[in-house]
Image (cartoon, grey):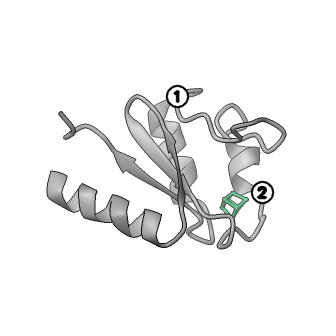
Amino acid sequence: MKRENEMNKEDLLNKGYRKYSGEEIEVYFSKDICTHSGNCVRTMPTVFDTKRKPWILADNGEVDSAMKTIDLCPSGALQYIYKKDDK
Ligand code: SF4
């Protein structure tokens, strides 16, 4: 499982995703893939706020809700890796 996570992480970075680390999850975002639907900022503005820098704060809300919000991203520009198996 951990191995797979590592590969995914590398894949994402190789594809141009940027990493936003949190305690339990790492959030990845690709500005090139984002279609600006606004789903993420509407659904969970505490974590996703385009007026803030960094605009993603992975720990600024319930982790479960953040993961569900990321799953709803229509373009795939948002991804996450759950860090449970790390360490
Ligand atoms: S939900 Fe996905 S496609 Fe929509 S604004 Fe957020 S990152 Fe971009």
Badge number at residue 13: none
Residue in the picture at 46% in, 33% down: 22
Label count reads: 2
Residue denoted by label 1: 59
Q: State the quadrant of the N terminus.
A: bottom left
Residue in the picture at 71% in, 41% down: 55
Residue 33: % across, % down: 65, 73
Residue 62: % across, % down: 51, 29
Q: State the quadrant of the C terminus.
A: top left
- Looking at the rendered structure, the secondary structure element under dot 2 is loop
- Looking at the rendered structure, the secondary structure element under dot 1 is loop
Q: Is residue 1 visible?
A: no
CA gap, disc 1 and disc 2: 20 Å
Ligand 1 contact, mark 2 (Cβ < 8 Å): yes
Quadrant assignment for ligand 1: bottom right
- Label 1 CA crowd tier, 10 Å (few <14, some 14–19, many 20+): some
Q: Residue 10 appears in which quarter of the rendering?
A: bottom left
Residue in the picture at 17% in, 51% down: 2
Residue 50: % across, % down: 79, 45
Residue 61: % across, % down: 57, 28
Question: Tag 1: residue type?
Answer: Asp
- Label 2 CA crowd tier, 10 Å (few <14, some 14–19, many 20+): some
Q: Is residue 33 left or right of residue 42?
A: left
Residue 19 or residue 60, whichever sits in front: 19
Residue denoted by label 2: 38
Q: Is residue 75 left or right of residue 71?
A: right
Residue in the picture at 62% in, 72% down: 75
Residue 17 or residue 48, whichever sits in front: 17
